[in-house]
Amino acid sequence: MSLLYDYLDGELEGVSLERVKAHFEACRMCYPHLRFEEAFRAAIQRAGRGEKAPADLKAHLLELLESTSAES
Ligand SMILES: [Zn+2]
């Protein structure tokens, strides 16, 4: 799954970016992970900017993430 994180971190470019992006959008296994990671990072960023976020949101999302990755 490291490509997912490279993708989200913006570390992919050119052909690699296009191939990975196309794969995530077409792959039923990867797509849910991508959507979850995007939502997770957006929530973290909102919290980092001081916007209102439930105090236990991070813990809740981390639990979800752990249960999600445990299945794969
Ligand atoms: Zn895939």
Image: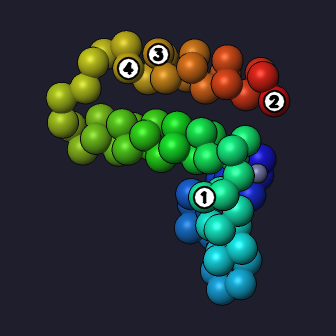
Q: Is residue 37 visible?
A: no
Asked which secondary structure carries label 4, the reply is helix
Q: Which residue is at the front of the view, 60 or 48?
A: 60
> Do the residues bearing badges 3 and 2 touch, measured as CB atoms within 8 Å?
no
Is 12 left, or right, of 61 in this rendering? right
Q: CA distance from mark 2 to mark 1?
A: 18 Å
Q: Which mark is residue 38?
A: none
Going by the numbered disc 3, the residue's amino acid type is His
Identify which amino acid the numbered label 1 is placed on.
Answer: Glu
- Which residue sits at x=20%, y=37%? 50
Q: In terms of depth relative to the viewer, which is nearer, 23 or 49?
A: 23
Q: Secondary structure at mark 3?
A: helix
Whichever of labels 2 and 4 marks the residue nearer the N terminus, that label is 4
Whole-number angstrom distance, CA of label 3 to CA of label 4: 5 Å
Q: How far apart are the two marked residues, 1 and 4, measured between alpha carbons?
A: 26 Å
Q: Is residue 38 left or right of residue 34?
A: left
Per the image, the residue denoted by label 4 is 57
Amino acid bearing label 2 = Ser
Q: Which residue is mark 2?
A: 72
Nearer the N terminus, badge 3 or badge 1? 1
Q: How many numbered marks does the figure carry?
A: 4
User: Is the C-beta of the residue carrying label 1 under 8 Å from the nearest atom of ligand 1?
Assistant: no
